[in-house]
Amino acid sequence: MTRLVREPGALREACDEARARGHRVGLVPTMGALHAGHLSLIETARARGATHVALTIFVNPLQFAPTDDLDRYPRTLEADLARCRELGVDVVLAPADGAMYPPGFSSAVEVGGVTAPLEGVHRPGHFRGVTTIVAKLLNLAGPCVAVFGRKDYQQWRTLARMVRDLDMPVEVVGAPIVREPDGLALSSRNVYLAAAERARALGLVTGLRAAWDAFAAGERDPERVLALARGPVEASFDRVDYVALADADDLAPVGAELGARAVLAMAAHLGTTRLIDNVVLGEDPRPGF
Ligand code: PAF
């Protein structure tokens, strides 16, 4: 049975009780509009030993800029709860209005370094909002395995850094990207795409594949790999924020020659919709097929 709780303290009680009964808690933080990518996070938590799964649904205003899509972000609580029930999630926290940031809330958690490039350049303040809410959720859940999707690659690396730096009793796990059969990475924002935009969105995965193929064939010149990735993205998107290579762990710039492993990350706009995607060259399978 899935229990829905509205108050943050009730999540803490549920997780404490579960641990007292000998369970390992798995935490899956989400903003709702659950799709197969989220469901794989639940499976990953279980595969990593979680026997009591807590899922949170909260569209966190702190991580949206005034120009972002906070107001139109899909909110589908009833459908989300039905999916959680089907999947045997034990407890869902969908906080009541004002419960996460009560009047007078004035604290923040900020991680340096890994948050600076890529999304950090284009979405100032975004990671501060993410780390603040996730620190709160981890504090509520207590010792646990916490699972995040690798589509938000920089977010995953940032949260792993935060947990290490702040000695949180949490195992942070990044779950592989889930893709549509044609290769498009699943995202709650895909619902914004009109049919023609949906087709153009494949420019991201086409770019990733071109780079993946070149890397697999032995290409190690970052500029040549980037040019191959950029071509399809620039051809199909209205505006490109970045197509970049970075160290796969801390997102530091790559050298003049690529090593055994690097993340290729991209963000681009189709009309009012911003999509991101990535692949770890030298580690991930070829994106899509
Ligand atoms: O990835 C997300 O859905 C959000 O950034 C998260 C981790 C739930 C924090 O609000």
Image: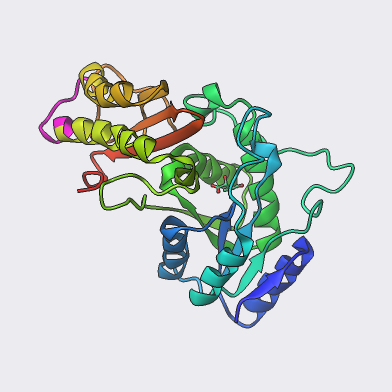
Q: Choose between 10 and 230: the one closer to the eye.
A: 230
Q: Is residue 247 above or below residue 242?
A: below
Res 32 → quadrant: bottom right
Which x, y percent locates residue 203?
Answer: 29, 32
- 216 in the magenta segment: yes
Residue 189: x and y in percent read 49, 43
Q: In this view of the protein, which residue sits in the foreground, 5 or 195?
A: 195
Q: Position of residue 51 (x, y in %)?
A: 51, 76
Q: Quadrant of the N terminus?
A: bottom right
- Is 151 on the left-hand or right-hand side of 25? left
Check residue 271 for magenta coloring: no
Quadrant in the rendering for residue 225: top left
Q: How is the image coloured?
A: rainbow
Q: Which residues are magenta?
A: 214-221
Q: Position of residue 112 (x, y in %)?
A: 59, 29
Residue 249 seen anywhere in this rendered image of the structure: no
Question: What residue do we see at 64% from left, 27% from top?
Answer: 67
Q: Name the dominant secondary structure of the magenta segment.
A: loop
